[in-house]
Image (spheres, rainbow, N blue to C red):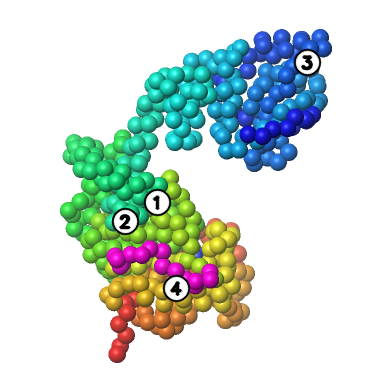
């Protein structure tokens, strides 16, 4: 750790509760310090570290009472040691400074240990104990329940990834563990499932069981519906089955997937799975976003490999981070060296241009029309090279017409992408459609004000959306 000492404005220093190990400021102590300052007494410099997200500000590591006293006496500048903690936990560092004349109380040291462990579960009891001035055994006793629930979190992650058919070596890599640990955890899964099934058979609802055990609802559904056929799964999930080629759902089912730009209803994914895949088939979602596809696969008893450029290891470990990048030196790459090949691809890419602000800058939504179409062409070729002859694709898309403020009669063919543009590329790359299913978006996303403005000008908005289902056999 390095440091420099200099005069800094008292107003540039803040007390960040996140890294403050005490329960509060002792005002009697501040009063005594203020009196000492007025009497001309000089204190040791306080210690601070630069605020990571607020340039120009410093957060206190040591000297909260002296700092409060400086403020109350109107002193504008103080001598401070500015520390570079070089990755060390600031809360634990601040706690080491509290060992001395005024020790942390029992409550404060317990709370500090728990906060430090919650931020970094790889910290040992000995390390934490050294920082807060307590023995390893005492710290162990502070952390017992947190360690148990952390372990439970890992069990659930491993169970989920395994249930989705992700091979053990990829589970190990994703969770930063060795394969032996994964293997050991998987050995405990039947006992865990038995526990949950017990609660389900006692009449608790899926959401009650999920809450009690800290599981996600789709994971509990995957157990609750085990052995059932698709028809019965739909019934239990409360979804009607649309027999015709128009699948219309006004709302997303909040039990499946996260709030995400461009989120699609789980009922739509469930219809695709029911009509175009079989139980235990492997589904590939190359741009999985909020995770509706893996969640619905759990409920429908399908395996699923999902990828996205957005990485959320804690909440969505099953979505493996991967960016499909046409501009890389090697061209478009396949993310896994898989023996397993998908039976069905569910591909729901972002629009180009229009929604660019909703996604990361590496997203294909930032591409120009030309580059976007080139990406799709290369992507469909890549898919064909890496799947089975029998693999189908469900491509979810909508016409992209730039109708903003333009009456329908004045709209020109000026660089939108319409369904026939996609079909041209698909045919060129060896994908032939068997079905075009209408799956309209809800018109409720337009506000009453917007609708009335559109009505006045005869503007025709877009709510049509399609699921194009394709195979690889042409007419030949
Ligand atoms: C329309 S969203 C998918 C929404 C998802 N079906 C759902 O219901 O939550 C498209 C996703 O594609 C991802 N994406 C865009 N470009 C990508 C790329 N080049 N590689 C990987 N993911 C990409 C975005 O991060 C975004 O999550």
Q: Which residue is mark 4?
A: 379
Q: Are marks 4 and 2 in contact (CB under 8 Å)?
A: no
Where is residue 277 shown, x and y percent of the image?
26, 66
220 in relation to 228, above or below: above
Q: Secondary structure at mark 4?
A: helix
Q: In terms of sequence position, does the residue under pointer 4 or pointer 2 come before the other?
A: 2
Marking on residue 42: 3
Q: CA distance from mark 4 to mark 3?
A: 69 Å
Where is residue 43 shown, x and y percent of the image?
74, 16
Q: CA distance from mark 1 to mark 3?
A: 54 Å
Which one is in front in this view, the residue at disc 2 or the one at disc 3? 3
Q: CA distance from mark 2 to mark 3?
A: 63 Å
**Residue at 42% over, 22% down:** 136
Q: Which residue is mark 2?
A: 166
| Quadrant in the picture for the N terminus | top right
Q: Secondary structure at mark 1?
A: helix
Residue 301, picture quadrant: bottom left
């Amino acid at each position: 750790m390095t440091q420099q000492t200099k005069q800094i404005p008292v107003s540039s220093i803040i007390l960040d509760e996140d890294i403050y190990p005490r329960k509060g400021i002792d005002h009697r102590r501040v009063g005594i310090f203020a009196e000492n300052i007025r009497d001309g007494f000089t204190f040791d410099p306080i210690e601070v570290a630069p605020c990571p997200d607020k340039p120009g500000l410093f957060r206190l590591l040591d000297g909260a009472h002296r700092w409060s006293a400086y403020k109350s006496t109107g002193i504008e500048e103080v001598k401070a040691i500015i520390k570079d903690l070089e990755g060390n936990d600031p809360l634990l560092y601040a706690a080491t400074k509290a060992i001395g004349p005024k020790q942390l109380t029992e409550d404060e040291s317990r709370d500090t240990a728990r906060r430090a462990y919650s931020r970094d579960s790889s910290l040992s009891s000995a390390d934490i104990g050294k920082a807060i001035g307590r023995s390893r055994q005492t710290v162990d006793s502070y952390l017992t329940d947190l360690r148990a629930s952390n372990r439970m979190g890992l069990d659930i992650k491993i169970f989920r990834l395994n249930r989705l058919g992700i091979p053990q070596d990829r589970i190990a890599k994703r969770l930063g563990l060795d394969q032996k640990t994964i293997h050991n955890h998987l050995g405990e899964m039947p006992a865990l499932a038995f526990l949950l099934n017990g609660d389900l058979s006692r009449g608790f609802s899926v959401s009650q069981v999920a809450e009690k055990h800290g599981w996600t609802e789709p994971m509990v559904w995957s157990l609750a519906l085990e052995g059932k056929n698709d028809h019965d799964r739909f019934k239990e999930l409360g979804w009607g089955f649309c027999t015709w080629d128009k699948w219309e759902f006004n709302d997303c089912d909040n039990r499946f997937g996260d709030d995400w730009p461009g989120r699609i209803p789980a009922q739509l994914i469930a219809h695709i799975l029911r009509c175009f895949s079989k139980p235990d088939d492997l589904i590939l979602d190359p741009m999985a976003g909020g995770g509706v596809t893996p969640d619905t696969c759990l409920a429908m008893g399908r395996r699923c490999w999902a990828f996205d450029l957005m990485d959320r290891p804690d909440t969505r470990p099953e979505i493996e981070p991967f960016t499909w990048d046409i501009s890389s030196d090697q061209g478009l790459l396949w993310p896994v060296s898989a023996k397993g090949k998908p039976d069905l691809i569910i591909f729901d890419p972002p629009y180009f241009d229009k929604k660019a602000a909703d996604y990361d800058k590496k997203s294909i939504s930032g591409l120009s029309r030309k580059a976007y179409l080139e990406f799709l062409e290369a992507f469909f070729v890549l898919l064909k090279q890496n799947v089975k002859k029998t693999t189908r694709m469900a491509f979810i898309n909508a016409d992209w017409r730039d109708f903003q403020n333009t009456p329908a009669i004045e709209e020109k063919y000026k660089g939108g992408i319409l369904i026939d543009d996609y079909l041209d590329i698909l045919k060129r790359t060896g994908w032939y459609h068997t079905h075009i299913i209408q799956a309209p978006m809800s018109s409720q996303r337009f506000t009453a004000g917007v609708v009335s403005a559109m009505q006045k000008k005869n503007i025709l908005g877009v709510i049509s959306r399609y699921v194009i289902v394709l195979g690889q056999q042409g007419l030949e």
